[in-house]
Image: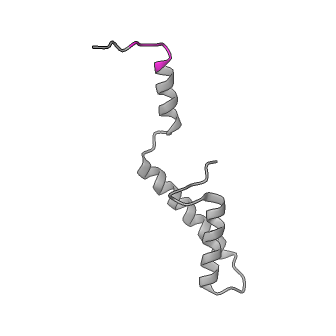
Amino acid sequence: MKKIIHTPFLPIFASILLLSCNGKTPEEYDTAFEAEFNACVDRAISKCANLNMDVCNLEAVSRCETFLGTKENPVVK
């Protein structure tokens, strides 16, 4: 049976890991991303001029994907 060697760095690494996720679950990250993405699309749609809604929606989604990425592949800021 192996003994686990306790190093003084273990608590530091654990702290960094816990702080990096900001205490959010994956579901909370997904919800936050969706809210931010939908707000982006709404802002982009509000600026459409002389376009039909289908074209406007496609351009708004494309623009927001450029800045934010997709839910499966978000842009890391």
Residue 58 in the image: above or below residue 65: below
Does residue 70 show up magenta in the picture? no
- Report x, y in % for residue 6: 41, 13
Please provide the residue range marked out in magenta: 5-10
Which residue occupies the foreground of this view, 52 or 69? 69
The residue at the far right in this view is 49
Number of numbered discs on residues: 0
- Report x, y in % for residue 59: 65, 75
The residue at the far left in this view is 1
Residue 45 in the image: above or below residue 27: below
Residue ID at (66%, 71%): 44
Q: Main secondary structure of the magenta part?
A: loop
Q: Is residue 65 left or right of residue 14?
A: right
Residue ID at (51%, 33%): 19
The residue at the far front in this view is 1
Residue ID at (72%, 86%): 50
Does residue 8 show up magenta in the picture? yes
- The quadrant in which residue 56 appears is bottom right
Q: Is the N terminus in the top left, top right, bottom left or bottom right quadrant?
A: top left
* Image colouring: one colour
- Report x, y in % for residue 52: 64, 87
Residue ID at (42%, 45%): 25
Residue 74 in the image: above or below residue 1: below
